Image (cartoon, helix red, strand yellow):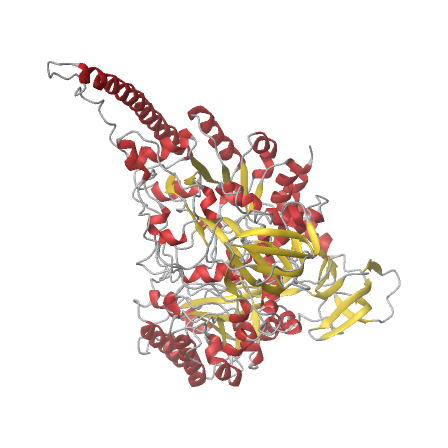
Amino acid sequence: MKGAVLVVAFVATTAAAEPIAIVGAKVHVKPGQVLDNASLVIDKGRIVGVNVPAPKGAKVIDGKGKVVTAGLVEALSGVGLVNVDLEPQIVDGRFGPLDPVHADPVHAGYDARDGFDPRAVTVPVARGGGVTTVIAAPAGGLFAGRSAAFALDGGATPVRAPAAMHVELGAGGATATGGSRGMGIELLREVLDDARAYGKDRASYERNAKRRLIADRLDLEALQPVLAGKLPLVVYAEAEADIRAALRVAADYKLALAIAGGTEAWRVAPELARAKVTVIVDPTANLPSNLEASAVHDDNAAVLDKAGVTVAISTLGGTNGARVLRQLAGNAVAHGMPWARALAAITTSAAALYGIARGTLEKGAVADVVVWSGDPFETSTGADVVIIGGVVQSLESHQTKLFERYRKR
Amino acid sequence: MRVVLVICLVACKHAAPKAAEEPKLDFSAPWVDPEKFWITGAPPPSRPLSDALANANAPTIAITGATILTAAGKRIDNGTIVLEKGAIKYVGASAPAPAGAIVVDGKGKVVTPGIIDAHSHLGVYPAPAGKGNAEGNEMVGPVTPQVRAEYGYWPQDPQIERALAGGVTTALILPGSANLIGGRGFTVVMRPARTAREAAFPGAPSTVKMACGENPKRTYAEKGGPQTRMAEYAAFRAAFAEAQAYAAKQGAYVKARAIWEDKRKRAATQDAKRKDGKTIAGEGAPEVVPVDLKLETLAGVLRGDVLVQIHCYRADEMAQMIAVADEMGFRIRSFHHALEGYKIRELLAAKQIAVNTWADWWGFKLEAYDGIPENAAMLTEQGVRVTIHSDSAIGIQRLNQEAGKAQAAGNRVGIQIDDNTALRWITANPAYVLGIDSVTGTLEVGKRADVVLWNTSPFSVYARAELVIENGQVAYDKAKGMRASDYELGDSPLDRSKP
C-alpha cells in the first residue's frame, strides 16, 4: 500500500514538465558566459534558450535579483549509497580491503546502480543545496567497482551507468594488497592483463582452457570498456608517486584516466595537463594528514587550473554533506581559482568526464537549473528553485519537516 | 610558481608589522600539579585570568579606517582600534594613531575579535595522523577523568598554523568522545610552540570532557561495557557518587586540619608557658586523604572549579545528563554538538546551558539523524548561548564561513540573526564556554588584543584573514604566507627554500 502511494507520487512529479520561463535573472549560460537581466526558457525537459519567447502558458518564475546556473554535478559522491555512515544496513559500495565474497581486493564488477537508493534521506537534502546530479561511486579495495550517475529527482533510472571504473591507490589500495604500494600497481596491471586476455578469447575461458586469471569473470567483463578507453578509470590517489604510477599505467594500457583526491597533483600539473587527465579535488583538503602525501596546499585547484588541467571540485564521497559543494567552489575562488572556472568545476567538468549531457544552460541541454538567491558560492545564498529535467522539484526534506514541526510553539 | 602565488597577494597593500618572534621559553614558574596541594589541604593555586592580558613584548598597533565588528553590539564604520602592551587601548570612531604605533590601513577591511573554537582536537589528533601520535582517546576504560589533553598536546601540529590562518586565536582542546568521562580539556592560544605550557591560555579555568550516546557504547560494547545507554548513565552516577564521597572526605580533612592547626597554635602557646619540658603540641595531625587523580577531577566538578563540557547529540540524552547533574549536584557549562538542541530549547535556556554546534553537519550516525541547519538560530532565539564549533581540523579553518551559513539558515526561515549575533557564535560565546569571557572574545577597551583583520565580511566564503593578532602580537600575516611547521620543513609547498 505504502509502495503504491510512493509510485503514484513519483509519476505525478515527473508528469509536471510544463514550460517554464525564469525572467529578469543573471543567467550563467555556461561557465564564463553570463547574461544580466535575462530570461531562461525551458520546455519539454530541455533548455529552449535565453531571451527567447516563452511558450504560451509557461510558468513564470521571477528571477529579479537572482542568479541562475545549471544544476550542480557532484563528481564523486556517496549520496544514495551511504545514508548513515555508521549504520551498515544503509551503507552500500564501501568495501574493506578484501571483498567478503571472493576475499580479494578486486570487485570491478560492482555496479553502483544496484546499490543506489533514489529515495535516500540524503537525496532531498543534497538537492536543496542545488546538487542535481551525483556520480555515486564505490570506494575501498583496489578495484572498488563502477559508479553510476543519477539525477536527484527521485528517479531510479540512472543518467548513465556505468559512469566510470574506480580504483584506489595509495595507503587505501596498499592496505588491500598487503601494505605495499608497488604490489598495488602490480596487481592493477595483472588484472588489466587478465581482462585483456579474457576479452580476446572468452571461448577458451568458458572451456576452462585458459591460464589462471586472478579476477572473477564479471570483474573481467566489467573491465572491457575500460580497456577500450570508453569507460573512464578514476584512480583515487593523493601522493605524487601514486599519481605518476597511475599516469604510467594509463599510458601503457591507453586508458581514459582521471585522478581523484589528488592532494599532491599540483606537483604533476604539466604532465596531467598533457595527458588530458581530469583531477577531482576537494579544495579545502589542505592538511598534511597522510604521511604518504604531505605536500598539500589550499591552492591545489587554482594551480592545476592555471596549468590547463581540467579540475572537478567534489566532496570526494560526501553524503550528508553533499550540499557544501558550492562552498567548496567558493573556497577555491578564495584561494585563487577564477570564479567561472570554479563554476565549471562543479558543473561542466564532471559532466564532460562522465559523458553526461548536463551542466550548462545552452540550447537543447537537459533542463537542470537552480535559481539562487545570490552568488551561488556565498554562505548567505540559498537555492530558491531547483529544476531537474524541466520539472520544478520539491525542496522539502526530513530536515525541513523537522524544522516545521519544532518551529510551532 | 606556487610560491609566488602565496606570497604576493597583499604584500603591497599595507605596511605589515613584524611577525611575532619565536616565543621565549618561560622557566620561571615550573608547572605544579594543583592536586599536590590536597596533601596539605590547601586549595589548588590558580593563575589569575588577568595574566592573559599583559604582554611586554607587544608593540603598539593601530588599525585605522576599518569596519570594526566588536561582538559587543557595535559596528563601527571607518573606525580605529589601538592595541598596546597586549590589550585593547582604544576602539571607536576614527582617531589618530598614537606616536610610534605600527599603523595598519584597514580601509575596505573588517576587524573582529579573534575566533575561538570551543571544540577542537588539534595537537591530540594531529596531522600527520600516524600510528604513533593519536592521543585523543584513552580507550582502556570508559571513565578516565585523570587524563589531560595537555599531556597529549603536540604544540607543533601542522594544523595549528592553518587554524591560525583562519583567524582562530584560542581553542579548547578536548579529549575525544570514546569515553564517558574522557579527561580534562586544555585551553590553548592558537600558536605553534615548543612546549604545551607555552601554548596554554594563561589562567583559563579547567574543563572536563564527558560524552554520552553512541561513541562510548561503540567503544566498550565488547570491552566490558557500557553496551547500552542504560549502563552509560549508571556509570556517570556511580562515578559522581564516588566523587561525592571523596569530596566529603576531603572536606572533613580540611575541617579537621583547621581544627588541628588551631589547637596546635594554642597548645604551642601553652607549651611555651610550661616549665616541666613536656609538650602537648606534638599530637598527631589528621590523616591526609590520599590523592586520587580520577576523583580529584570529579570533585573539582562538584566544587564548581572544573567546567563541564558534554558531547551529546539527542534531546532526550541531554535531558538525561541534566538529570544526572541535578541529582549529583554539578552544573553543565555546555553541550557539544547538540544537534537536537532545538527540540528542548526551553529546557536548555532555563538551565542556562550553552550549546556548541555545527552549521550543517548531520546524518553521519543515527544520533545525528535529526540535525537541522536552523538549530543555532532557533536556540539563539530562545536565549541559549550558542557557539559554532568545529571538531575538525578542516572546519576550524573557516568557522567564520560556518557562522555565515548558520546565520543564513536562520534568516531564510525568518529568524533574524544579525552580524553581531553571528559573530558572537564564534567569539564571545565560546569565550564564555571556556570561562575566559572576562578577558577575551569581544573588542572592548581593556580586553586582550586578540584581533583579526579580514579582507571582507568575515561571513563571506571569500573572506581571508590578513592579519591575526594574539595578545597584541602579530601571529599570522597573510602577506608573508603561512609559517611552515617543523614537520613540513624541507618537504612542503610552505617551505619556500625549495621550488
Residue B450 drawn at (x, y percent): 53, 53
Count numbered badges in the picture.
0
Q: Is residue A23 visible?
A: yes
Q: Quadrant of the C terminus of chain B?
A: bottom left
Residue A80 drawn at (x, y percent): 55, 56
Looking at the image, residue B186 sits to the left or right of residue B409; the answer is left
Residue A180 drawn at (x, y percent): 31, 70
- The answer to whether residue B161 is above or below residue B116 is below
Name the residue nearer the viewer: B91 or B497. B91
Name the residue nearer the viewer: B235 or A150. B235
- Residue A387: image quadrant is bottom right
- The answer to whether residue B496 is above or below residue B438 is below
- Residue B325: image quadrant is top left
- The answer to whether residue A30 is above or below residue B332 is below
Name the residue nearer the viewer: B135 or B178. B135
Residue B69 drawn at (x, y percent): 65, 52
Looking at the image, residue B82 sits to the left or right of residue B146; the answer is right
Residue at the spot x=63%, y=45% of the render? B72
Looking at the image, residue B381 sits to the left or right of residue A55; the answer is left
Q: Is residue A280 visible?
A: no
